[in-house]
């Protein structure tokens, strides 16, 4: 009988039903769109943030390796559990050399590094690693070194030595001389402006440290730190450790990398990791807040529509009560209607929200996106919650209807 | 007519400063047909609403079918209405989007379990076996009132209340409805309380009471 009542109620009163359906559908669509792109936005923002610098520093331990890491170990970084989260890494070898350029001399830091090295790891796609990808904010006048005898200079150092593109400079370390052609001058706004950068292999030969690096900067996509992520892994149970290890916290990714680099100690660069985590947390909070606001607006619209519908149906409700319907039976009829409208509205809202998410993703990030299927029950559930929230006031009003007042002749 | 269906003592109903029903003592035996007469505002509908559990008294006692209605909760009163009372309204008050059959089944739904065959039989008893699937808007006033009667009797109530049930009907339809009620009462043996301002309709009852300004001013037995 309830089904008959609901069916006839829908068929014979299409206008108010469509109004409520529209309110619920819009809420579910906006919620689906926001939740659908939330993951995408976080991912894109995390990628954007990666361009602001590495978030993991890999250093040699004091006891092993004699203060160096092995260059041979570097490809292993792209084989770890979190390899797909590691967007790039760059090795550095530091030394001090006497620079001589057209009679001008200066003792300066010489840094050997990868500028843009094609890295081929067995079983993996080849990748470009090095400072070019890791420090996109560097303002380079000239070009990146391509040959072993090419170098770039920090802007401050270049000014003092009066060097520019096309100049030559000789670097001397303990009697070993390496002549370098300056192919670019770099402005970074940091200490790098005081250094000379040359290919890693060149600086290794100059310093007599073949196959060695001083440190590695790693850039990894991570999730914001929470209380669990901040726990000391050594105090965790086995299950906790597994959960921690399998979550892309900056600490767990660092630990992951540390395990493949012999004699290394990996440390998160907290000013980057924390700022990034805080930003992503805030971004997610904004998305959630917008979703809740959309659902709240939808619930208000549902409430308004149902209030109007309830006023129109007060004789019907009064009659039901006069016939002996109790509060539960009256509620069952109206919540039954709301449930059916929610399921339909939630599903239609998912379909619309999916398209909306794709449109936003395409417009803002120029990428395609498909909302995950788990958003279907999520959309229907949120639609039902919205409908229930929007029904509270109208239902309360319905239950307070006095048959005597409404049905009097 | 041995047991008492309705028993009131000092029954009063006020709305703010207005006293719609002044203390009234009334006893209605089981199976009696009581007509309640009075002008508009005399308190007759107020009395019917109280007896039907649709309203609560301001003072006095009210027992219907042995139950003290003053002591019942909202849900208790709802249960009393669906299990004990059938109501026929002047304006029918049928659900417009349900068919005649479904309107009768709605009453069954609130009472217990809808039984289509039983509802169909009830409509056949009131002469509407051929109008089962018609909606109220497709029925005449007299037919709508007969649907209303079928709905009121479907759960075999002990007390049938009529609030000007023929007030909107022409003379012919009025006679048809009253004949029908008489037949049903003879079969079902329910007690009837019928509010009317029509002397002719009131005469169908066993007894008539007259109200004026909320006071029971007179009563007369129309049948022995």
Image (cartoon, coloured by chain):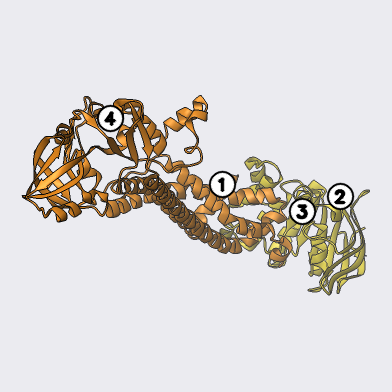
Chain colours: A orange, B yellow
For residue A192, above or below residue B56: above
Q: Is residue A308 left or right of residue B217?
A: left
Q: Disc 1 marks which residue?
A: A4
Q: Give the Cα distance between marks 1 and 4.
A: 77 Å
Tag 4 subunit: A
Viewport quadrant of the C terminus of chain B: bottom right
| Front-most of residues A159 and B77 | A159
Q: Position of residue A114 (x, y in %)?
A: 19, 38
Measured as percent of width and height from the top left, residue A409 is found at 71, 68
- Give the letter of the chain under mark 2: B
Asked whether residue A329 is in view, the answer is: yes
As measured in the structure, the alpha-carbon distance from the residue carrying label 2 to the one carrying label 1 is 33 Å
Front residue (pair B186, A245): A245
Q: Between label 2 and label 3, give the one nearer the viewer.
A: 3
Mark toward the start of the polypeptide (1 vs 4): 1
Local secondary structure at mark 3: helix
Q: Counting residues from the N terminus, which is met first, the one under dot 2 or under dot 3?
A: 2
Report the residue at 24% width, 48% height from top.
Answer: A192
Q: Is residue B130 visible?
A: no
* Numbered tag placed on residue B74 in the rendering: 3
Instruction: Report the disc number at residue A69.
Output: 4
* Coordinates of residue B154 in the picture (x, y in percent): 71, 47
Find out whether the residues at labels 3 and 4 contact each other: C-beta distance under 8 Å: no
Check residue B65 in the rendering and tell me which mark sits there, or answer none.
2
* Label 1: how many Cα within 10 Å (few below 14, some 14–19, many 20+): few
């Amino acid at each position: 009988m309830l089904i008959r009542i609901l069916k006839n109620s829908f068929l014979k009163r299409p206008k108010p039903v469509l109004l409520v359906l529209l309110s619920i559908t819009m809420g579910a669509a906006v919620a689906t769109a926001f939740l659908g792109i939330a993951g995408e936005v976080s991912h894109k923002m995390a990628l954007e943030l990666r361009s602001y610098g590495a978030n993991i520093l890999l250093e040699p331990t004091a006891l092993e390796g004699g203060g160096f890491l092995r260059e041979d170990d570097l490809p292993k970084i792209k084989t770890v559990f979190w390899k797909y989260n590691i967007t790039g890494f760059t090795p550095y070898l530091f030394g001090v050399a006497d620079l001589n350029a057209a009679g001008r001399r200066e003792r300066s830091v010489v840094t050997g590094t990868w500028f843009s090295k094609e890295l081929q790891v067995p079983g993996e796609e080849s990748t470009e690693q090095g400072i070019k990808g890791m420090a996109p904010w560097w303002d380079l006048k000239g070009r990146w070194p391509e040959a072993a005898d090419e170098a770039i200079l920090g802007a401050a150092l270049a000014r003092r030595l009066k060097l520019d593109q096309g100049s030559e400079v000789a670097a001397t370390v303990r009697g070993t001389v390496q002549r370098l052609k300056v192919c670019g001058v770099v402005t970074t706004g940091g200490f790098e402006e005081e250094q000379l950068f040359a290919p890693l292999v060149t600086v290794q030969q100059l310093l007599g440290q073949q196959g060695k690096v001083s440190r590695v900067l790693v850039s990894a996509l991570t999730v914001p730190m929470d209380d669990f992520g901040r726990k000391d892994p050594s105090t965790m149970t086995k299950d906790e450790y597994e959960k921690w290890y399998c979550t892309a916290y900056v600490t767990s990714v660092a630990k992951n990398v540390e395990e493949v680099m012999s004699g290394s100690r990996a440390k998160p660069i907290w000013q980057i990791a924390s700022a990034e985590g805080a930003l992503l947390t805030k971004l997610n909070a904004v998305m959630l807040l917008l979703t809740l606001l959309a659902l709240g607006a939808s619930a208000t619209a549902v409430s308004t529509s149902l209030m109007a519908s309830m006023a129109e149906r007060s004789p019907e409700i009064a009659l039901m009560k006069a016939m002996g319907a109790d509060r539960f039976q009256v509620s069952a009829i109206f919540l039954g209607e709301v449930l059916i409208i929610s399921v339909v509205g939630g599903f239609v809202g998912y379909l619309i929200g999916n398209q909306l998410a794709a449109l936003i993703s395409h417009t803002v990030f120029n990428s395609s996106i498909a909302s995950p299927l788990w958003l279907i029950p999520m959309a229907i559930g949120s639609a039902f919650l919205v409908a229930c929230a929007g029904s509270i006031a109208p239902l309360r009003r319905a239950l307070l209807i006095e048959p005597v007042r409404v049905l009097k002749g | 007519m041995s047991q008492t269906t309705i028993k009131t003592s000092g029954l009063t109903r006020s709305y703010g400063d207005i006293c719609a029903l002044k203390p009234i003592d009334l006893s209605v035996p089981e199976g009696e047909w009581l007509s309640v007469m009075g002008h508009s505002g005399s308190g007759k509908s107020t009395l019917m609403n109280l007896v039907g559990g649709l309203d609560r008294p301001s003072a006095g006692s009210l027992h219907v079918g042995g139950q003290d209605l003053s002591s019942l909760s909202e849900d208790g009163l709802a249960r009393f209405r669906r299990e004990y009372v059938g109501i026929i309204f002047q304006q029918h008050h049928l659900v417009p989007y349900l068919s005649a059959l479904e309107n009768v089944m709605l009453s069954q739904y609130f009472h217990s379990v809808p039984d289509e065959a039983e509802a169909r039989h009830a409509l056949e008893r009131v002469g509407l076996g051929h109008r089962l699937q018609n909606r109220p808007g497709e029925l005449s006033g007299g037919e709508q009132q007969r649907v209303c009667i079928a709905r009121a009797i479907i759960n075999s109530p002990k007390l049938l209340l009529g609030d000007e049930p023929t007030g909107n009907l022409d003379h012919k339809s009025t006679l048809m409805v009253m004949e029908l009620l008489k037949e049903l009462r003879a079969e079902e043996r329910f007690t009837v309380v019928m509010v009317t301002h029509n002397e002719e309709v009131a005469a169908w009852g066993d007894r008539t009471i007259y109200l004026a300004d909320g006071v029971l001013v007179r009563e007369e037995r129309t049948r022995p």
